[in-house]
Image (cartoon, grey):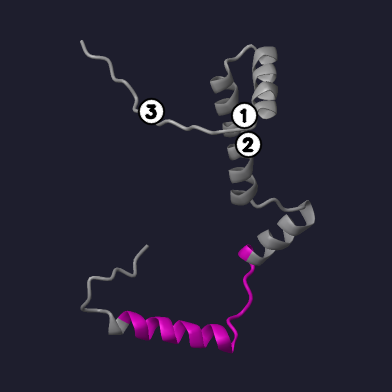
């Protein structure tokens, strides 16, 4: 009966002695090894950055405005109609190629 072992990658960093000692103290106070502390701290910060960049937050007023626009879209203007014509022409021109226009 074999056990699946997840592949792990390695991260290393060289830091000034003062930084290392600060990290050691923080790790000790949190009950973790320096490595555990570094990974947990870096992961927490990475997740916060990713969420900040991936999530769009709207005020209640802006959410109502956006929802109203999605439920009641305006009539297409001349620029949108022209863009649609260009898109349709591009699809026809690429009809025999391997490019797939479907999502």
Give left or right: position of 68 versus 95.
right
Q: Residue 79: image x %, image y %?
A: 56, 87
Query: Considering the numbered disc 3 on the image, is that residue within a helix, a strand or a loop?
Result: loop
Residue at numbered disc 3: 8
Q: Quadrant of residue 62?
A: bottom right
- What residue do we see at 69% from left, 19% from top? 26
| Helix, strand or loop for the magenta stretch, by majority | helix
- Residue 59 in the image, given as x and y percentages of width and height: 77, 52
Q: Do the residues under discs 1 and 2 have CB atoms within 8 angstroms?
A: yes
SS at mark 1? helix
Nearest to the observer: residue 49 or residue 61: 49
Q: Which is nearer the eye, 48 or 8?
A: 8
Give whichever of discs 2 and 3 has the lower sequence position: 3
Badge number at residue 45:
2
Q: Label 3: how many residues lie within 10 Å, few (<14), some (14-19) or many (20+)?
A: few
Q: What residue is at 22 percent from the left and 76 percent from the top?
A: 97
């Amino acid at each position: 009966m074999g056990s699946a072992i997840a592949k792990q990658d390695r991260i290393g960093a060289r830091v000034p002695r003062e930084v290392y000692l600060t990290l050691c103290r923080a790790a000790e106070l949190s009950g973790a090894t320096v490595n555990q502390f570094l990974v947990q701290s870096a992961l927490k910060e990475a997740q916060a950055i990713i969420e900040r960049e991936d999530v769009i937050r709207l005020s209640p007023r802006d959410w109502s405005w956006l929802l109203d626009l999605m439920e009641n879209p305006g009539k297409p203007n001349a620029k949108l109609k022209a863009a649609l014509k260009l898109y349709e022409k591009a699809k026809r021109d690429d009809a025999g190629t391997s490019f797939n226009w479907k999502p």
